[in-house]
Amino acid sequence: MIDNVKAKLIYRHKAIFPDSSIMEMSIWMVPTPVKGSSHPYKYRLFWGRHGERIVGYDNERGKGDHCHLDGRERPYRFISVDMLISDFCSEIDRRISK
């Protein structure tokens, strides 16, 4: 949940794939960075199947920018919204191509 009431949704997309996996992306612009991040965005990107997250990117308050790949959490270096979406989609493509 976003604590900042002046957050502005700038991007939202949801897709359901033939294999029953779900992709959801939500990105907000916030007036002040969330704790742990240095940019004006709050985001949550998710791809999973049957209730299991396979790929996720978010900047949960206090944790800062990070990603979840195959059950492991790793730091993520946020560069731009476009790069975030590209990195997320590349990780999904990598797993679909296996």
Image (tube, rainbow, N blue to C red):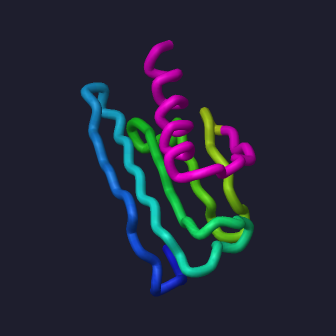
Say if the magenta span includes residue 86: yes
Residue at 70% from the left image edge and 47% from the top image edge? 76
Q: Nearer the viewer, residue 59 or 8?
A: 8
Q: Position of residue 23 (x, y in %)?
A: 38, 42
Q: Position of residue 84 (x, y in %)?
A: 55, 46
Q: Nearer the viewer, residue 65 or 17?
A: 65
Total marks in image: 0
Say if the magenta span includes residue 55: no
Residue 47 horizontal side relative to residue 19, left or right: right
Residue at 62% from the left image edge and 60% from the top image edge? 59
Q: Nearer the viewer, residue 48 or 77?
A: 77
**Compared with residue 61, is residue 46 higher up or lower down, i.e. above or below?**
above
**Compared with residue 82, is residue 28 higher up or lower down, i.e. above or below?**
below
Residue at 59% from the left image edge and 69% from the top image edge? 40
The magenta-colored residue range is: 72-98
**Compared with residue 64, is residue 94 higher up or lower down, i.e. above or below?**
above
Residue at 39% from the left image edge and 69% from the top image edge? 9
Residue 51 horizontal side relative to residue 65, left or right: left
Residue 50 lies in quadrant: top left
Q: Position of residue 21 (x, y in %)?
A: 35, 34
Residue sitting farthest toward the top = 98
